Image (cartoon, grey):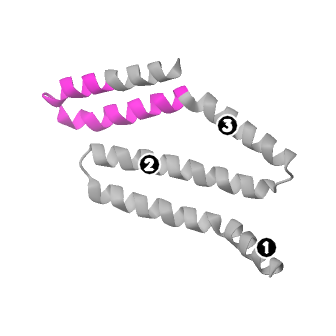
Amino acid sequence: MEIIQIIGIGFSGLLIAVLLKEYKPEYKIYISIIIGILIFFLVSDNIAIFINQIMSFSNRLNIKNDFISILLKITGIAILTEFAISICKDSGENAIATKIDLGGKIIIIGISMPIISGLLESLISLL
């Protein structure tokens, strides 16, 4: 199972980080980034399956591909933002993590404007 591999990679990284913390504490951040990238590549097949299922679902329901594309972008931005925030917090840089979080939220709001506009137009036409 993939979760066992993910946990194994995570614990391996944790063990390496704890061992190196004593001698080279600056390597902790590099280990965190490498472990994150390894886990991302491990689950990338699931991401592709998810995207294909969403696109298939939207085609069956005649949902505009533009909306689905925006939702997938928002999901990607949220995942990448969370990854960056975690790396910053792991290195003790909470202030930077907060700024990245704010930036990600602002980008998501900007990208979601076509969906919000479409919903408002539909609501107005119903009234």
Quadrant containing the C terminus is bottom right
- 76, above or below 28, in the image: below
Asked whether 121 or 87 is in front, the reply is 121
Q: Is residue 35 magenta?
A: yes
Q: Nearer the viewer, mark 2 or mark 1?
A: 1
Instruction: Please name the residue that numbered disc 1 is placed on.
Output: 122
Mark closer to the chain start, 2 or 1: 2
Give the magenta part as a residue range: 13-42
Q: Where, by quadrant of the figure, is residue 9 drawn?
A: top left
- The CA span between labels 2 and 1 is 32 Å
Q: State the image coordinates of residue 125 (x, y, percent, origin top left).
A: 82, 79
Instruction: Please name the residue that numbered disc 3 is placed on.
Output: 50
- Within 10 Å of disc 2 (Cα), the crowding (few <14, some 14-19, many 20+) is some
Mark closer to the chain start, 1 or 3: 3
Q: State the image coordinates of residue 104 (x, y, percent, origin top left).
A: 48, 59
Q: Which amino acid does label 3 sit on?
A: Phe
Cβ atoms under marks 2 and 1 closer than 8 Å? no
Q: What residue type is labelled 1?
A: Ser
Element at badge 2?
helix
Give the main secondary structure of the magenta stretch.
helix
Q: State the image coordinates of residue 47 (x, y, percent, origin top left).
A: 62, 35
Q: What residue type is labelled 2?
A: Glu
- 36, above or below 11, in the image: below
Q: Where, by quadrant of the figure, is residue 96 drawn?
A: bottom left
Q: State the image coordinates of residue 112 (x, y, percent, origin top left).
A: 63, 64
- At x 57%, y 48%, the residue is 76
Residue 87 left/right relative to 59: left
Q: Does the magenta stretch include residue 17?
A: yes
- Within 10 Å of disc 1 (Cα), the crowding (few <14, some 14-19, many 20+) is few
**Which mark identifies residue 82?**
2
